[in-house]
Image (tube, grey):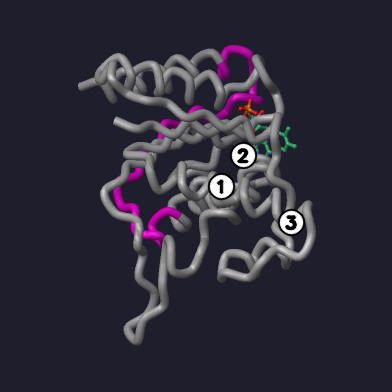
Amino acid sequence: MKLLHVDSSIFGDHSASRELSAAIVATLTKTDPSSEVTYYDLAAEPAGHLTLGEFMAFGGSQPQDEATKLDTERNAKMLDDFLAADAIVIGAPMYNFSLPSQLKAWLDRLGVAGKTFRYTENGVEGLVKGKRVIIASSRGGFYSEGHPTAFLDHQESYLKGMFCFVGITDITIIRAEGLGISPESRKTALEAAVAEVKKLAA
Ligand SMILES: Cc1cc2nc3c(=O)[nH]c(=O)nc-3n(C[C@H](O)[C@H](O)[C@H](O)COP(=O)(O)O)c2cc1C
């Protein structure tokens, strides 16, 4: 199995989503020891905002300068690694009700017409098939169903929407929320999330 592991938290070793994404990858690789893992740390090596030159290169335009050429090569590798993966594990914290901008910047390199989706007479068609996405979601507060702040979730909902758009339907969320409420709440939420991770081995 080819595994793509992507982290985006700015908190390094203190990150909840990194702890969970690492636990997910450890569980999957234990289940299939022949797994090959490709890792992206988007906080350490951010892709930056998508530029017009990069966007034009998606459609086949030649980069006009050296910086755009390098960015275009990097983008092609990001897309290739995504398309080659059987499973994609994403450490995705909630920042300001949404994603870290580093993670959004990576997603901006995956939404490529003709490669991951296309428009047809009948609407949009996702071109990415047969993959599994597992999201390690971390949040300071509570936004899951039933909470009054659920409408502020533009993090999990965005990720699910993005991956559904490109054709991926097998999406699992491992969630630790309420992490900022108290140390006890953080401990309980992380323990519950790690218990969910263990179920992935079944
Ligand atoms: C810049 C920033 C913005 C945040 N915005 C929110 C937010 O909108 N809602 C929330 O519940 N928690 C928010 N948090 C708290 C994080 O979701 C929480 O600390 C979570 O554990 C982060 O995951 P990480 O440790 O993997 O980075 C924010 C944290 C940071 C650093």
Q: Which residues are magenta?
A: 163-186
Q: Which mark is residue 68?
A: 3
Q: Amino acid at mark 2?
A: Met
Report the front residue among 105 and 199: 105
Disc 2 under 8 Å from ligand 1? The reply is yes
Q: Give the crowd class for mark 3: few <14, some 14-19, many >=20 residues within 10 Å.
A: some
Q: For the point 39% across and 16% down, which residue is it? A: 26
Tell me the residue that label 1 is attached to. Answer: 155
30 within the magenta span: no
Looking at the rendered structure, the kind of residue marked 1 is Gln
Q: Foreground residue, 74 or 6?
A: 74
Q: Is residue 45 above or below residue 78?
A: above
Give residue 87's position: percent from left, percent from top.
Answer: 35, 37
Give the foreground label among 3 and 1. 3
Q: Is mark 3 within 8 Å of ligand 1?
A: no
Where residue 97 appears, x then y in whole percent?
64, 47
**For the point 55% across and 36% down, which residue is it?**
92
**Quick one: quadrant of the N terminus?**
top left
